[in-house]
Amino acid sequence: MITIEGLKKFGNRVFDIYFAVGAIAMGLLAALVVFAVIARYFFHLSWKELSEFNTTLFAFTTFWGMGANIIKDEHVMIDILYDRVPPVFKRWLAVFNHIIVLVIDLVFTWQGVAYVQLAGKQLSMGMEIPMAYMYGIMPVAGVICAFCVVVKIAMLITADISYFEPRNKVLKADDAG
């Protein structure tokens, strides 16, 4: 029988793999950019394929990170007002916020699919591969992000109320010694 703890353990393993793919891609991007800069400025060597691959890898790491940011609460949030809301209301405010994120992500994914269908047949200038391979990260990452948002909504609904306690200390005038 599948238990909640078993599902959490499985989810953590899947997330670790997902995160590792992003970390490896980011490390590869950093190494290739350093290599390209050294090759260009010290040896006057430049490759259009490498430049285009770096650009594609940059886009990959950006879109790939969307889901990780949702799961780990690393997305941009202006929480000065949110931290003042009582925890019992924060749960539903957070769920509503993530539903909005899900809708935006689904629109992004839909538009990504449409864009890949429109421009995906063209060959890239550098690597000379169909642009669908380069643009395809948008809908793929959008689907992954949508899954992460649904998981996050489930986590928010089932979380202990202590999860919604303020995370940032609000400074008052008399605190600024």
Image: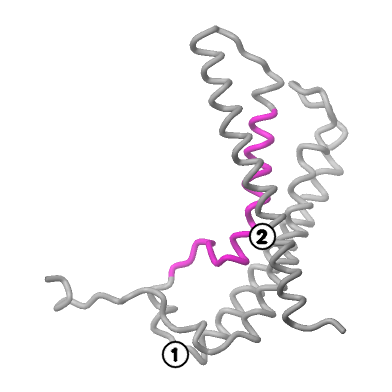
Residue 55 included in the magenta stretch of the image: yes
Where does the image place residue 35, in percent across and percent down from the top left? 57, 22
Residue 3 included in the magenta stretch of the image: no
**Disc 1 marks which amino acid?**
Pro
Could you tell me which quadrant the C terminus lies in?
bottom left
Q: Magenta segment, principal secondary structure?
A: helix
Q: Could you tell whether 99 is left or right of 114 in the image?
A: left
Where does the image place residue 109, in percent across and percent down from the top left? 76, 56
Furthest residue in direction top, as rendered: 44
Helix, strand or loop at disc 2? helix
Q: Which residue is mark 2?
A: 67
The circle on residue 86 is 1
Q: Could you tell whether 120 is left or right of 151 in the image?
A: right
**Disc 2 marks which amino acid?**
Gly
Q: Residue at x 76, y 76 (%)?
A: 7
Furthest residue in direction bottom, as rendered: 88
Could you tell me which quadrant the N terminus lies in?
bottom right
Where does the image place residue 66, in percent across and percent down from the top left? 64, 56
- Disc 2 and disc 1 in contact, CB within 8 angstroms: no
Observer-side mark, 2 or 1, equals: 2
Helix, strand or loop at disc 1? loop
Q: Nearer the viewer, residue 22 or 143?
A: 22
Mark 1, residues whose alpha carbon is within 10 Å: few (<14), some, or many (≥20)? few
> Magenta residues, as a range?
53-78
Furthest residue in direction left, as rendered: 177
